[in-house]
Image: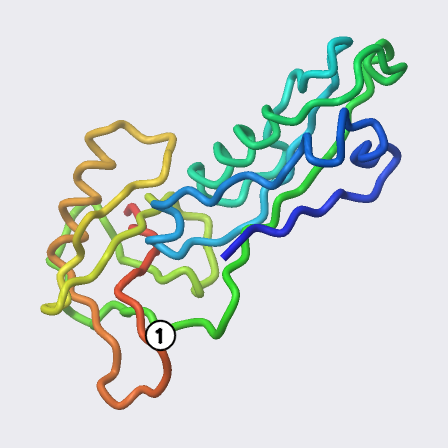
């Protein structure tokens, strides 16, 4: 249950040889909440090295789709230390690094939306699981747990460019839906799920 650390290929790759010590840049810790919700993704960062060897100007170049993973990647990178006085620091060279957040083992059976269970809404068109292709419509991304009765619990909205009222309403609407796993489906099961509430 640990992230894989991969240096991206390119004009400037991650400068392992310039680390203060081999142990001065370790992989970031998985956020406990991300593990509980079983979310995965790949975060690509870009950064510079200061003359003192500290990481400078780190930013997310391509997000994982989950801010909790991206913020953990930034926090992990910020702890890295390089040798002081590097030429790359004087020249302001930018370096890429990618953290692949991948859970090992077979993918579990996740609760899926039970058709026809969501309340009619004049604001929301539908709920989409993550395996459905994204269309041009706006959506609020949510992760949540499903209780024994199929009700969404502990719903966490992903950061979105929407008014907080829209996000709140999306969370409330999701609570009218019910989710489940086919009783005869074989394989490991989980109570975690995530998807999109699509706006009209």
Residue 30 position in % (x across, y down): 47, 45
Of residues 139 and 155, which is closer to you in this image?
155
| Count of numbered labels shown in the rendering | 1
Of residues 155 and 16, which is closer to you in this image?
16
- The residue indicated by pointer 1 is 109
Of residues 172 and 191, which is closer to you in this image?
191
Residue 4 position in % (x across, y down): 63, 51
Q: Measured along the vertical axis of the image, is residue 88 above or below residue 71? A: above
**What is the image's colouring?**
rainbow
Res 109 quadrant in image: bottom left
Residue at image point 15% right, 49% down: 173
Res 46 quadrant in image: top right
Of residues 172 and 199, which is closer to you in this image?
172
Query: Which secondary structure, mark 1?
Result: loop
Q: Is 40 displayed left or right of 184 in the figure? A: right
Q: Is 11 displayed left or right of 24 in the figure? A: right
Residue at image point 76% right, 24% down: 20
Residue at image point 80% right, 35% down: 16
Q: Is 190 displayed left or right of 69 in the figure? A: left
Residue at image point 85% right, 39% down: 10
Local packing at callout 1 (Cα closer than 10 Å; few below 14, some 14-19, many 20+) is some
Residue 196 position in % (x across, y down): 34, 52
Q: Measured along the vertical axis of the image, is residue 174 above or below residue 96? A: below
């Amino acid at each position: 249950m640990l992230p894989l650390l991969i240096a991206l290929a390119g004009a400037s790759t991650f400068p392992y040889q310039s680390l203060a010590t081999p142990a001065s840049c370790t992989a970031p810790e998985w956020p406990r909440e991300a593990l509980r919700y079983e979310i995965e993704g790949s975060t690509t960062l870009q950064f510079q090295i200061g003359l003192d060897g500290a990481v400078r100007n780190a930013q997310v170049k391509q997000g994982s789709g989950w801010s909790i993973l991206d913020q953990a990647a930034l926090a992990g990178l910020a702890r890295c230390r390089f040798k002081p006085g590097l030429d790359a620091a004087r020249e302001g060279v930018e370096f890429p690094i990618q953290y692949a957040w991948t859970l090992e083992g077979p993918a579990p059976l996740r609760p899926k939306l039970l058709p026809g269970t969501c309340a009619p809404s004049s604001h929301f068109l539908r709920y989409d699981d993550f395996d459905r292709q994204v269309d041009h419509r706006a959506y609020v991304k949510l992760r949540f747990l499903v209780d024994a009765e199929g009700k969404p619990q502990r719903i966490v909205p992903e950061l979105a460019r929407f008014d907080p009222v829209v996000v709140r309403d999306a969370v409330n609407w999701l609570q009218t839906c019910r989710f489940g796993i086919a009783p005869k489906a074989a394989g490991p099961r989980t109570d975690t799920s995530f998807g999109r509430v699509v706006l009209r």
